[in-house]
Image: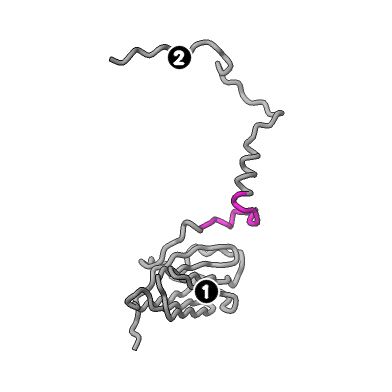
Amino acid sequence: MWCQGQPASAKWYDRRDYVFIEFCVEDSKDVNVNFEKSKLTFSCLGGSDNFKHLNEIDLFNNIDPNESKHKRTDRSILCCLRKGESGQAWPRLTKEKAKLNWLSVDFNNWKDWEDDSDEDLSNFDRFSEMMNNMGGDEGVDLPEVDGADDDSPDSDDEKMPDLE
């Protein structure tokens, strides 16, 4: 007695070995995720009114259905798709270039990993390394700035007139 459902809103992001899709459905029930080599089908009942959601996605590239998983929480269903070819970037989630109004990029988790040779470094390690590299080296000659060590008064050192 299920009719064709409306797509659930979803966010996605790309990693070296996986593509992640989060279907944003609160209080989901009867969650069904079907991983195929080039397609993902998601369905569930959501919310207090048991609204039927159905998403069918022809994927940009192949995945390994046996190594792909999903996890349900009270707020969403996160799908982890194992790429068929690790290290190949997905510029979009879908095979077609069409804009889907229910699908968006998850910029909070997006990362340009292609240019990142330090994949194993955590963000904190990278930040610490950057801060350490920014410290002044003793042997580096910095250019002199005219008047930097000058104790003479500048034009902006003059006393300001009192406000009335």
Residue bearing the label numbered 2: 157
Q: Residues within 10 Å of mark 2 (few under 14, many from 20)?
A: few
Kind of residue at disc 1: His
Q: Residue furthest bottom?
A: 1
Report which residue position mark 1 lands on. Answer: 70
Highlighted range, magenta: 110-124
Q: Position of residue 164 (x, y in %)?
A: 28, 15
**Residue 143 x/y as whole percent:** 61, 24
2 and 1 marks in contact (CB < 8 Å): no
Instruction: Please say whether residue 164 is one of the residues in the magenta stretch.
Output: no
Pick the front one: 80 or 117: 80
Query: What residue occupies the far left of the structure in this picture?
Result: 164
Which structural element holds mark 2? helix
Local crowd size for mark 1, using a 10 Å CA cut-off: few (<14), some (14–19), many (≥20): some
What's the amino acid at mark 2? Asp
Q: Where residue 96 sits: x, y (%)?
A: 43, 70
Q: Main SS of the magenta segment? A: loop
The residue at 44%/70% (across/down) is 74
Looking at the rendered image, the quarter that the N terminus falls into is bottom left
Q: Quadrant of residue 159?
A: top left
